[in-house]
Image (cartoon, rainbow, N blue to C red):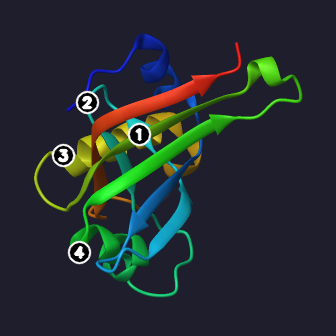
């Protein structure tokens, strides 16, 4: 696990949307926007109740993580004033967490960050946990 600077940790805590990149066992990439929460050690994303075509554990991101746990999460900010641009790239290992105290704690953190999750039935849903291994970024200022 890697240490983040206070600015990196703040950006992970405050940024509303990230883009999660996974790859299947053949290296075929898949990128999807995700809601996420950072608890100071791990990054979490819950498989939520928004409309999906199949089962939660059958989603491509889940299948990819199960066959290749290496992932990247990109968060960024765009502004017409390019001195305000920044991005953060977190590379790490992802796992699907379905049991124990960790999923409810992660869901509580996500509900704290996203009011939309407060009334959504998430209890018992699988959670993706990302263990950051490398963090890089850039800022225009």
Kindly identify which residue carries mark 3: 102
Q: Is residue 50 above or below residue 94?
A: below
Estimate the spatial distance between the alpha carbons at disc 3 and disc 2, rounded to whole Å. Answer: 12 Å
Residue 44 locus on image (x, y percent): 35, 46
Front-lying residue, 53 or 139: 139
Q: Is residue 34 left or right of residue 123?
A: right
Instruction: Name the N-terminal-most of marks 3 and 2.
Output: 2
Instruction: Name the N-terminal-most of marks 1 and 3.
Output: 1
Estimate the spatial distance between the alpha carbons at disc 4 and disc 2, rounded to whole Å. Answer: 23 Å
Residue 105 locus on image (x, y percent): 25, 40
Name the secondary structure under disc 4: helix
Residue 3 locus on image (x, y percent): 27, 21
Front-lying residue, 114 or 20: 20
Name the secondary structure under disc 2: loop
Mark 2 vs mark 1, foreground winner is 1
Q: Is residue 96 left or right of residue 58?
A: left
- The quarter of the picture where the N terminus appears is top left
Mark 4 vs mark 3, foreground winner is 4
Name the secondary structure under disc 3: helix
């Amino acid at each position: 696990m890697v240490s983040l600077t206070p600015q990196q940790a703040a950006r992970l805590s405050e940024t509303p949307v990230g883009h999660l990149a996974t790859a299947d066992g053949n290296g075929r990439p898949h990128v999807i926007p995700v809601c996420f929460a950072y608890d100071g050690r791990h990054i979490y994303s819950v498989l939520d109740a928004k409309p999906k075509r199949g089962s939660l554990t059958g989603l491509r991101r889940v299948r990819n993580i199960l066959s290749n746990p290496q992932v990247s999460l990109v968060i960024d900010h765009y502004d017409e004033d390019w001195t305000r641009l920044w991005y953060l790239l977190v590379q790490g290992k992802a796992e699907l967490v379905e049991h124990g105290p960790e999923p409810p704690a992660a869901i509580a953190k996500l509900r704290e960050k996203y009011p939309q999750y407060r009334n959504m039935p998430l209890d018992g849903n699988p959670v993706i946990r990302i263990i950051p291994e490398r963090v890089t970024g850039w800022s225009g200022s």
